Image: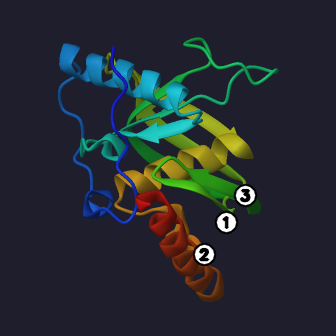
Amino acid sequence: MAILDIVTYPNKILKQISKPVERFDSELHKLLDDMYETMIAKNGIGLAAIQVGVPIRALLIDLGDEEGKQSKDTLIEVINPEFLEWDGSLKYNEGCLSVPDYFDEVERYKKVKVKFFDRFGKEHIVDAEDLLSVAFQHETDHLDGHVFIERLDYIKRKKFEKEWKKLLKKRKK
């Protein structure tokens, strides 16, 4: 397994729309394993394949157990996700490995029903709510070429752009 480089905003790769996975093979399994190691190393709870430069419809979510401890037992591997239902709304303070060190409140659906496949091509349907619902929506946005900051209202987005430029200048020093 390997820790992969995370593609960061404003890299144009993040705008790509990911292609459906057609082969559930050892190459996919290795990518998922490397993505998991990367997500854990970067202290994330979700990671889409496009965030490591691979434009396929694959993502990971691991919210951990009751104590927040992440493991392969709490990992959800999601291939070719499709939302079947949405309901309610909630605001959640989101962050993103592709937009490091920035967090802001985003409005999402409170509950979603999602159909997807696991690494072996087995179909699953999950009813998710609260943080799990947010994670499914956030990561699926990546597969559709979107980053969470695009969901901010105009004023918050302008504030983000200003703060982000300052942050990038600091990192270059």
Mark positioned earlier in the residue sequence (2 or 1): 1
Secondary element under disc 1, as helix, strand or loop, is strand
Query: What residue sits right under mark 3 in the picture?
Result: 93
Secondary element under disc 2, as helix, strand or loop, is loop
Q: Depth check: give the residue in front, 76 or 95.
A: 95
What quarter of the picture does the C terminus occupy? bottom left
Q: Quadrant of residue 132?
A: top right
- Residue 4, given in percent of the width and then of the height, sits at 33, 31
Within-10-Å neighbours for mark 2: few <14, some 14–19, many 20+:
some
Kind of residue at disc 1:
Val
Q: Which residue occupies the extreme right position in the image? A: 67
Location of residue 77 with respect to 149 vertically, above or below: above
Q: Is residue 129 visible?
A: no
Kind of residue at disc 3:
Asn
Location of residue 89 with respect to 110 vertically, above or below: below
Residue at the spot 31% in from the left edge and 21% down from the top edge: 121
Q: Which mark is residue 152?
A: 2
- Residue 34, given in percent of the width and then of the height, sits at 35, 22
Number of numbered tags placed on the structure image: 3
Q: Which mark is residue 106?
A: 1
Q: Depth check: give the residue in front, 14 or 7.
A: 7
Location of residue 161 with respect to 91 vertically, above or below: below
